[in-house]
Amino acid sequence: MSLYSKPEKLMSTKPTKISRRLVLGGASVGVSLALPFLPSALWSRRAGAATVGTPARRFMAWFLPNGFNMPDWTPTTAGIGWKGQPISAPLSAAMTNVQNKTLILTGLDMQSTAIPGNPPGDHGAGTGIFINMVPVNGHEGDKTRTSLDQVLLPVLNPAGATQPLLPSLQIGVQGDNGLCDRTSCDYSRTASWTKGVPMPNIYDPQQAFDRMFAGYTAPSAGATPAAADMAAAQRLAERKSVLDKVLGQATALSAKLSTTDKQKLDEYSTSVRNLETRLQAIATGGGTSCTPIPRPASPGVLNFDRGITPSSILQMDTPIFLDLMKLAFQCDITRAVTFMMGNGTSNNDYSFLGAGPHHGTSHHGGNASNLAKLTKIGTWEVQQMATLLKNLDSIMESDGQTILDHTTFFMSSDIGDGQNHNHWDQPVLLAGGASGKLKVDGRHINYIPQMTFPRPLVGPQGGPHTGRVLISILQAHGMMVDTFGLATGGPLPELLA
């Protein structure tokens, strides 16, 4: 296809015809190249600037039950460069190098939405509104209850664009908790909702694998070289062929350009060579290969009435789910994930940490030994989260940024302190940044400046509504609303880029 509009009438010699847009095939990269606007060559003004495509935007909500030992979570300083306490330390730059892509938000308050409860109790009330902000009490069966992951789907999976295999994915570590706070267990076992209908979690890693990789056929054993390697090499060769063609055309055109346009074309050629380098990194194991992990074993039948999840399930399933969630984004299987480290009122057994059942321990009674056990649990939970964030940040996308850069990650809990059951002063974290639309830059934002340190187990009220963080996420994705569920007040300006 020619980029010229009857150029023979404007130039003494007929220029070489060059393809305006070449598309690199393959789901693992899926990028496009457009030559820059060069006036002296009479390029179409629709050509635009050099680009390597627009990676997909993604969202993940991560639910942690039973709150934290908050003095061991909250950084003692505000702003950039905070020093982590024992629970937040796994996120620090020294540990994972993702601190500058996170925000810790202290002092948010969703008490007015969660309460009045009774029923449900405080765990069910906090879990039930987690990312939808529609109260449980008086609103059971409310058809407006739609969670943030589902509201964002039209933006994450826009009509007319390539669609992921699954619109969204719901995963939970633990499914055997019969404690539902005197109301429907849906409000304790579900983070994702659409129009009042719960979207159940997948608790079995094997079932999650099968849902994600239905139809996947592993390379035959003993193949030399392995079929997967051969396919990857073929994809790389095809993409490199396109890059070579683009660079060859650019070289042929160079002699016909003005000095200014030669400079533009040189910059463009450099970007193409950089892309070639990234593709080579992919081929050598440093990029976006989305070969599935081995199909995991099933943990067995879950007993919803048992009330305590064995340590063996936590230790076996959690790392598998981390790998599966990374692959879900890396392979573009889905762009929206909700993950629950435990149901509301979770009694996951953390004996492998020397801590015991979570819910019982969270009723610490001010006992120093119980609080130390809660710190061990919280630290382990944040280590799992930090591992996933680091993995997402290690995968380069077609624009030179990482999957984490194009992901909005929200973490919080049902309550703040397990003894007091407060719905203010809860742990809240943002990571990623909505493809640059959120200002996630390593800050600790303390909305309660009167809080003293060493801080109390439960800080004072007075901060903005937690739902305003969700409104900020919506606006960062182009959905210009000022309310969400029953949360009002508009976005938090300091969160928006």
Image (spheres, grey):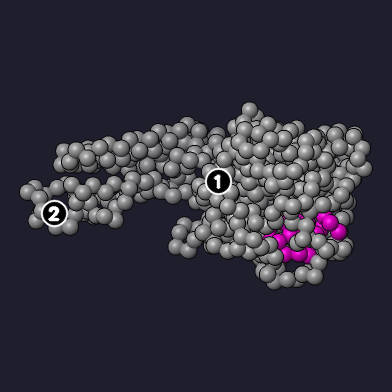
Q: Residues within 10 Å of mark 2 (few under 14, many from 20)?
A: some
Question: Which comes sooner in the sequence, label 2 or label 1?
Answer: 2
Mark 2 element type: helix
**Eye-nearest disc, 2 or 1:** 1
Residue 445 or residue 227, whichever sits in front:
445
Q: Give the number of the disc on residue 245.
A: none
**How far from the left and from the top, in percent, is residue 390?**
60, 36
Q: Is residue 370 visible?
A: yes
Circle 2: residue type: Pro
Mark 1 element type: loop
* Residue in the image at 16% along x and 38% along y: 255
Residue 433 or residue 80, whichever sits in front:
80
Q: Give the number of the disc on residue 439.
A: 1
Residue furthest to the top: 94
Among the 4 quarters of the image, the one containing residue 110: bottom right
* The stretch drawn in magenta includes residue 126: yes
Above or below — where is 175 with respect to 250? below
**How far from the left and from the top, in percent, is residue 487?**
68, 62
Cα separation, mark 2 vs mark 1, equals: 46 Å
* Residue in the image at 86% along x and 37% along y: 371
**What number of labels is visible?**
2
Identify the image quadrant of the N terminus.
Answer: bottom left
Tell me, yes or no, whether the two marked residues, 2 and 1, touch with CB atoms within 8 Å.
no
- Which region is colored magenta? 121-136
Circle 1: residue type: Lys
Residue 85 or residue 369, whichever sits in front:
85
Q: Is residue 407 visible?
A: no
Above or below — where is 247 with respect to 133? above
* The stretch drawn in magenta includes residue 190: no
Among the 4 quarters of the image, the one containing residue 387: top right
Q: Which residue is mark 2?
A: 7
